[in-house]
Structures are given as C-alpha cells and as structure tokens.
Image: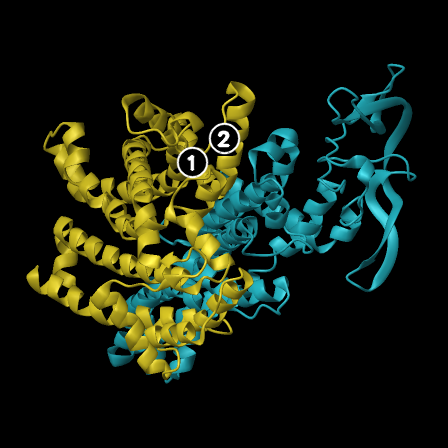
Amino acid sequence: MLKFIANRLLLFIPTLIAISIVTFVLIQLPPGDYVTSYLMELEQSGQEVTAELATALRQRYGLDDPMVIRFFKWIGNIVLRGDFGYSMQWNRPVGDLIWERIGWTVAISLATMLFTWLLAFPIGVYSATHQYSPLDYVFTLIGFLGQSVPNFLIALVFMWLGYKWFGLEIGGLFSEAYLEAPWSWPKFVDLLNHLWVPMVVLGTAGTAGLIRTLRANLLDEIRKPYVVTARAKGLPERRVIWKYPVRVAINPFISSTAYMLPGLISGATIVSVVLSLPTTGPMQLRALMSQDMYLAGSFLLILSSLTVLGTLVSDILLAWVDPRIRVSG
Amino acid sequence: MFGKTKNKSEGLFTASQWQLMTWRFSRHRVAVVSLVVLVIFYLIAAFCEFVAPYDPGRYSAKYVLAPPTTLHFVSPEGKFSLRPYVFGLESARDMETLAVVFEVDESQVYPIKFLVHGDPYKLWGLWESDIHLFGVDGEDGMLFLWGADSMGRDLFSRVVFGARISLSIGLVGVFLSLVLGVILGGISGYFGGAVDVVIQRVIEFLRSLPAIPLWMTLAAALPHGWSPMRLYFAITVLLSLIGWTGLARVVRGRFMSLREEDFVMAARLCGASEMRVILRHLVPSFLSHLIASLTLSIPGMILSETSLSFLGLGLQPPVVSWGVLLQTAQNLRTVVLAPWLLLPGLAVVIVVLAFNFLGDGMRDAADPYSH
C-alpha cells in the first residue's frame, strides 16, 4: 500500500509541472501583454500613466525577460508568495478575488454532492436488485433524461415554473431583504429556501450518471458465483447484497470524487450564471470574456491541479476499498 | 412455428458477426426508433432551406414575440377538415398597459398547404427555388409554429436552420478523436514496453486538464479576427486533441487482451505482417465498440455547443445554432414573457436522448457476452 501511494505521489509532481507550463503558454497566447492592456485601461479612465509605473510593473512580472525566465518568475511568485498576479478588470490581486468566492462555491458544491449521493445510492441499488421492474424503468428513463437535458435548461424551466405557479423569484442565495443583513436564524432559513434550487438542478445530471453506472456495476456483480454461494449458504438477502457486491460496485462513487474536487471550486459555471449565484464560475467567465488572463489562467491552474489531486485521492481511496487495484497497481 | 425457429437457429451458427449484431440491434426497439428519429433530424438539417417555412433572417416589427399560432381543424362555421387552418394575426397595443397584444382575426382564414411558394433560397448554394415543404399562401398570413423571437422572426424556421450547424460542427472533432484514440491506443496496447509507458503518461496528463475551463481559456486566447464559426471549429479540433484519451484507454485494453489470443498467433504463423494482423484481425473484433462509443460522444459535442453558445463563448448571433437561439432566453423576464423561446432546448433534448439510446443499443448489440 505504501509503495502504491509513493508511486502515485511520484507521478503527481511531473504532472503538476506540465500543467503549469501549459497554463503559462495559454496565458501568453493573446496578443499584447498584461501591462500594455492595464496601462491602456488606466489611460482610458483618465488616470496618469507614468513611465515609472510601467517599468515597475514590467519589472515585477519580468515582462522583458525571455519566456523561460518569465515562467519561473510567474510560478515562483505563486509557489513562494502565493501571488497569482493582478486582475486588471477588478484592479485587485487575483488571490484575494478567488478566496472571497471560494466559501460559497464550496458550500453549494458540497450540498450538491451530498444530495447526489443520498439520492443516487439507494436508487442505483434498488434499480439493480429490481431489474426490469416498473420503478426500474422509471428511474432509467429519468436517468437518461437527466443526462440529456442541459443543466442550464433545467435551471431555466425551474425558474419559469416557480414563477408561474408560486410567484417565486428563484435565483441568488438570499432574498433582497436578507442580502446585507447580519447572520441570524431567519437569514439561515432564507438561505435554505434558496439553496435547494441549485442543489436539485446541479444534482440532477450527476445523479443520473451515478445511478446508471452503479446499476450496471451492481448487475454485473450480483450475477457472480460468490453471490450465489452466499445465498446458498442461507444468508439473508439484505446481507447478500450489501456485504460484498455493493462494496465492489461503489467504485464509481469514489472515482467521481476526482472530478468533484475541481467541481467544488469551479461550481458549475453555467447554472451559476443563470441562477446568479455568487460562486467562482461566473467570475471566471467574466475574466475570460474581458481577457483578464492572469485571473483566468490562475483558475485554470488551480482547477487542473485540483483534478490531479482529486485523482490522487481517489486512486488511494480505490486501492483502500478494492484490494485488487492495490496488488496490480 | 417449429420450422421457423429451426431456420433461425441454423442461421445463427453461420451468421457473421455483423449479422448477429444487426439482429440484436433490431430487437432493441428504443434504439431503432432513436435511429429513425436521428435520420429524420439529419435530413431536416440537410434540407433545412426547404423544410423551414420562412427565411431565418426574415424579421418583422409587427410580430415581435408573437406566440405560437394555434392550428384549427374546425372552421368557424363548425365544419371539420383534415387540412388545418390558421387565422390571421393582428398586433395591437393595449392602451392601458402599453404592452403589445396579439389578436386573432377569425375573418381571415389561411389553410396550411404542402409545397407552397415562399421566401426564395438557394439549396446548398446550388439550386434556386422558393418552394417550401409546408406553409400558408400569400404574404399576409403568418404561420408561427413555435412562436416568434424578439425580432419577429419565426422560431421554428430558425430551429430548423440551427439543426444544420448544431448537428454538424463538432463532428470533425469527434472523428479526429476517434482516429487519434485508435492509433495511439493501438500502438500502446500492441507494442507495449517503453512506448506504452510514454503514451500512458501523456494520457494521464491530458486527462487532468479540466475541459470547460480549458475551453473557455482557449476561446479567449485564439485570434480575435477570426469569424465565430472558424473560432468554434478551431476549438473543437483543439479539444479533440485532448479528447482521444478515453477511447485510447479502451482500445489499449482490448489490444492487450486480444494480442494473446490464438487467432492472432495463427495469423502470425501464417506469415501475416504486423499491419495486416492489426487491421485485418484485431480492429474488426472491436470495430463495433468503436462505433458505439463514437455514437455516445456525439451528444457530448451537441451539449457543449449549446452550453457554450448559451454562455456567449461558443457561436455568436449572426450564426443560427440551437445554443445561439437559447441565448435569447437567458433571464427570467424573457422566459416568463415568452416561454416558447425555450423550445430550441426541446430539439436539443430529443436529439441527445436519441443519440444516447442509439449508442446504448449499439453497445449492447456489439457486446458478444450480452444476452
């Protein structure tokens, strides 16, 4: 097990380095550099642009140096000082901007994840153990639909129906009255009243996918001879299913955590835009639209690193749950 | 009854792999229906100028956000006819709320006919014509099957035209992914050793790049002088350079297990070259799987076109695609005022659902171990 983890860790570092290089190249791609556009913006807003400011900025980011040195300065700033660069759009350090929004993003994503798991797990097991029953067909149909309807469309339909039937203005996380209010019990209730919408909307697609994989895996598993043996020994049906087949079939839940970790931070951009949620997604979108490359690049770097980290965590978890992976890996 | 089964079971022994698959596939009724639906959609996309009752750019201030026209089968006199009618549509302003209201004018009756003369078009840029599959005669009657958009353009015609772009623009990328996946996965699995290790590391790296943020960064990084179509096409091609990894893993696994099989050894002993072993003996044994996975990757491409255009990162307005059409329905106010603007989403859902069912059916049919 230790050897397995060490092996994975050794792969982790070169991957991170490769990711940082790709991100850097992408940041450099648009014509002009960050200082030229920043100074242009300052000039447009009527501020005085001195030559010293330009040189200071250029020196800080080392824009006159060759590409390789610039790369090491950029990544050095991030690793050593946590300085992700400066957002010209917001006129503030990128690091601060991201940290501000990360709380809500993680909260919404965790709630969604919980919803997905709580829903997908029992349904998946039921569908597999009651294959071709009417309810199984219903769940399969819902599963297919959940995979086929774009998330933002679900969000829009929700908003429309909510308004039409209940006169609700769905969207955001708080009612206007509580937006600036300090934390209190009614504010918390108000939050819960709003939170379920993104939870359900975001959870639908994830739930659908998980149900389908769990069902397929469990179906493969419960046909195996050891399940028959367990039944022949007279184990109660409940134990037969839950003791081993479910444990093996649970793999997709664990490997999906690899993709949930970056999802926690990016927070489903499209739905966030439609429902106007204060997550990082819409900010990243705006950064890209206005060519705020340091902000956008930092997002890409953070998200890819988290994917790698998530893969690492899920690999270790998988090896822990399933001894077969430990041995062959 | 007995004779029939006997014939079929006899046929079963001599049937080729493809025949077996076709039999299994035709038993999967949902998949067959999906195939028919998709063929219809692609035919509509190919002949959209003919199918759409109006030109997608034809606008009229008179019909801004006109609701879907009701089809009548019973004439005002109470006479039933199989040919549906529509009534004339008049827009007026409600003097109290100042909102535009539409009034149905029951004195004007326009029967819906097949093959009517309408807006002129040039099919595939080659043949000029003005004949449309269906519509109403004359200039006065309007047929808004799915309502009109904020510029008074017929939404149904626009959805029909959007099909052409939405259903085709990502296909090149999907195909490129397939080719790359088969070649690199094949090399990795067949030869093994150091080549395998290198390719596996590359795959692991590419898989760690998150698709949507990468897409958005690419969209911002590509030259701004390009037309939206060219930009979008470039990104789908670039992304296919990343998207081949999943397929490559499957192909690699298949190659690894197949190269040990007896029939491969037999082919080698007969003096077949490596290339012949791969192309003649190995690839056909999982070709069906490739087709199924190809089918399952197309809905992903349609969904990303829709989502990205919806966000404003994909295609842009002069281009008509399903994602662009949905852009107009971005906020609650518009959706409440004109819920029919969500209808392009219905087209997306139907096509994606059909592709998923079809791919599922094909995968089941292609799997020699399924029952």
Name the residue at 35% across, 61% down: A298
Which residue is denoted by mark 1 in the rendering?
A: A201
Q: Is residue B148 above or below residue A323?
A: above
The amino acid sitting under disc 1 is Val
Mark drawn on residue A158: 2
Name the residue at 47% across, 69% down: A49
- The image position of residue B227, as x and y in percent, is 64, 65
Cα distance between the residues tagged 2 and 1: 8 Å
Q: Residues within 10 Å of mark 1 (few under 14, many from 20)?
A: many
* Chain letter of the residue beneath label 1 in the structure image: A
Quadrant in which residue B84 is drawn = top right
The amino acid sitting under disc 2 is Phe
Q: Is residue B183 left or right of residue A186?
A: right
| Quarter the C terminus of chain B occupies | top left
Q: Which chain is cyan?
A: B
Circle 1 sits in a helix, a strand or a loop, which is it?
helix
